[in-house]
Amino acid sequence: MSSHVKLWRDRVGTADYDTQIKEVRLQLAEQLRIFDSQVEQKSQMLQDLTDYLRRRGEIEGEYARSLDKLSERFSSRTRKKEPSHQSVVNCWQVLLTQTRQESKEHNMLSDSYSNTLPLQLSHCIEHAQSLAKRSRDICTQLHDGLLKVTAELQTALKTYYQYYTEFLSADGKLKEATRLEEKQKPSASKKMERLIGKRQCKVEEIQLKCTKARNDYLLNLSAANACMNKYYLHDLSTLIDCCDLGYHQSISKVLQFYLSSRQGMQQNVSSGLLQLNTTVSELDQNQDRNTLMQANTSVFCLPLRFQYQPYDADQVCEVSATGEVMSELVTRFQQLQSRLSSVTMEVEESGKLLQSAQSTMLSGIVEVTFGPSPDLPNSPSHEGSSDILAYKTQLLKRRVSHQDTESLYFVKVKEHLCNSSLISKLEAKHDLLKVAIQRAESLDVNQSRTYSRRSVRHRKTQLSTQIGQKLFNGDLLSYIQASGQPIPTVVESCIRFINLNGLHHEGLFRVPGSQTVVNQLKEALEKGENPLDEGRCDIDSVACVLKLYFRGLEKALFPEDSYEQLMECGQIDDETKKASQLKCIISTYPSPLIIVMRYLFAFLHHVSQYSDENMMQPYNLAVCFGPSLVRGPDSGDAAELQRINALVKSIITQHESIFPSQNELAGPVYEKCMTMEEDDCETVAEEGDGEPDTSQIKETKDVLLGVALFDYTGRSSFELSFKQGDRLILHTKASSDWWRGEVNETRGLIPNKYISVPSVAGGQDQKEKDSVKSICDRQQKEEQQRVEQSARLKVSNDKFGVGASNVTSTKVSLQIPTGQYMRLGSSPGALRKTLNPQMRRCTVGGSAGEVNSIEVDKDVCQMMHSVFQELISRKSS
């Protein structure tokens, strides 16, 4: 019953986003419709003005009666339209009012009204339609970007829900195993402890995946909201300005042209001209833009923010930067910071170029539309046919040059808007990561123990000589069949390493790695080793190894006999039909190849989702991998390479539709939120499993006694828990960080950093003495200070319970209370900062609160006086 409830809640959360995104889609479509209606309105306005002037030229002779009819005709048209308060419409209304007063217009203006002004207005219409078309293209591209961000948000939400469901399932299994352990008999407790340990590791791993998925979801959520804010608050205004660019100026020029031609008009129309001049001076593009947006508030208003929708039982609503995620987020934060600075510089430069291009564009519109001298002379000019021809030729050249300027301007507008939207997206992620990292650093100051990001991995590997097939420069299908590895080691290890360390690395797969490092990695992988487990390799070198592996295969990943079919599919324009055809072709391949393809292309698609940071869009990835994955007889041709790259790009973007799911074809699949392999989590546990009694009897012959320096609570059934001062029996070394031993007759693993072992501590005596001597040399520069420090030491010894020194020849016996000093720190790091080397040595044989006697040299004792005094002064401060 609970599973149905959770599923219903999942659907509700997804449905909320679907409804909200559907409303955004409708809003974006309505914006395009309004843009189109604005273009029609402007074209109609300009066409009406053109018709008006032509008709005015024709009826100048008829004068009063004809002008009255004309003004009435256009006034009726204006009354039928919706009322508007835009400055251009106001000018048009004032012009009609002035027309009714100009019933006695001069016949001298008939030629200019019939020929010159209509030609200029036709140019204005062409410019307005051209600008509107280009602005609409940019608007459509920005809409695609917004929909892409929302799609990524939905994908991240689904991934987060999926991993959290797995976490709840694994946690339920762990609780069930715990309950069974309580009911089991003591004889089966060891088996149950092993089972609980493995399930605990599984829960921790899935919890880490869930944390990564939640972080990715929160980052995409912030990026989606930032893109929405940027588009609705800034981009829409810019696009409307681009669409209206030159329109108001053209109208103003036409009317100014008209005004200049009316200078000789009779005195009875002077008041009307003054009014019209005032209206023309009030033409304001920004005001008209705001008026348009306010008149359509429901379309241009900013939609609601996408709210965080956590899984049912998840209480975390912030980006988590704890544990292993910290280093990954720090790396991502640094790369975001670098990317953000570079994009910001580009936006600043593009903004300057945009302003320059805009001014050039405005001057070009005026020059092409009205010519070099737009003012009309007082009397009609009678130019010869040769002058008219030269003027038309010059005008044609200007129009060609203006088209280039127009193209450049819209390229700059597109770059500026896209980059500024990218800045908003990157800044949202950057600020969120910054807060999370600062919060995590403040919380981790006093943390005594953190898990190692890289654990020792004992991976069973097979040498290529034992398999009988070469890893590099071999046949992939034969290697998979011989080794039994569904995904070859080099592919799986490189992809896992890049997933954990390099998804945000700028220039991934494009920047070449070190050839020496690449050769070393290839040799190690060929021998059956896995050098990427240490996590210290260069990202570019690892990416280069992955590319070289597929490039060096004897047979390409896509069989050559299907090359022609693949190229035919690449020519299909419909992406859905293309994906269906590719799925049919790929389904005929051997299953091992399909599994590798599915794994690789899911990884490449995941890399492309971080293209804002790593600069690797799907086509860039296709350029890097296409020639290696798809080979044909003419694959070396430049045109053929472009076809291959376009095909691989389509497979990357449509991989989910092309390749079968895990239910359709069993095999490993790529996971977005990877952790270290299960071997990493279970290595220590496996080392702690019970061994035969004969080995245990042998180990007891050479046991060591240790003392617990700090409290420790075991994280699994294989690790022992103990208190500070407990005596431990150590049998053998399990690893560099763990002992096999027993506490209170209970066997298990003991952490090396939490105990003191005589044989280990004794080997560092000389180094500790040298450190003590170096400290004391700095303190013995003046004899008077040494005497005062000795006196203060005596008082401090009484205070802390240190007994008097017993001097025997050159030996001094010190009574040191080990327990009191050991309470000053709560971790191995704190002990090293609080106690001097001799104090650490004295804790080997005594427990907490005991007083141990150690014999040291007299010179060393004098040195230790100043050391103790310095430590006490630091503690008091």
Image (spheres, rainbow, N blue to C red):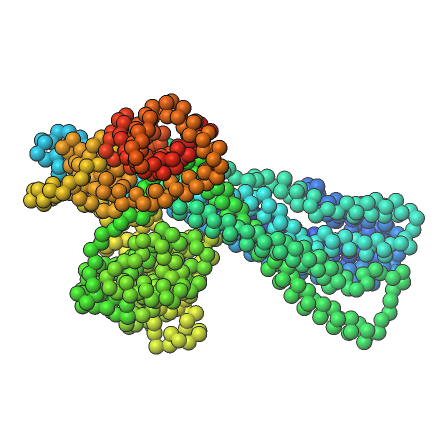
| 200 in relation to 114, above or below | above
Q: Residue at x 48, y 53 (%)?
A: 612
Give the percent coordinates (x, y) of residue 240: 63, 49
Give the percent coordinates (x, y) of residue 418: 55, 53
Residue 698 sits in which quadrant?
top left
Query: Is residue 655 in view?
Result: no
Q: Residue at x 28, y 68 (%)?
A: 472
Give the percent coordinates (x, y) of residue 392: 75, 71
Q: Nearer the viewer, residue 137 or 428?
A: 428
Residue 608 sits in which quadrant?
bottom left
Q: Residue at x 28, y 63 (%)?
A: 524
Give the percent coordinates (x, y) of residue 366: 74, 60
Q: Residue at x 82, y 47 (%)?
A: 277
Query: Is residue 401 in view?
Result: yes
Q: Nearer the viewer, residue 95 or 748?
A: 748
**Quadrant location of the N terminus in the rendered image:** top left
Does 368 sit left or right of 510 as displayed? right
| 509 in relation to 864, above or below | below
Does 300 sit left or right of 572 as displayed? right
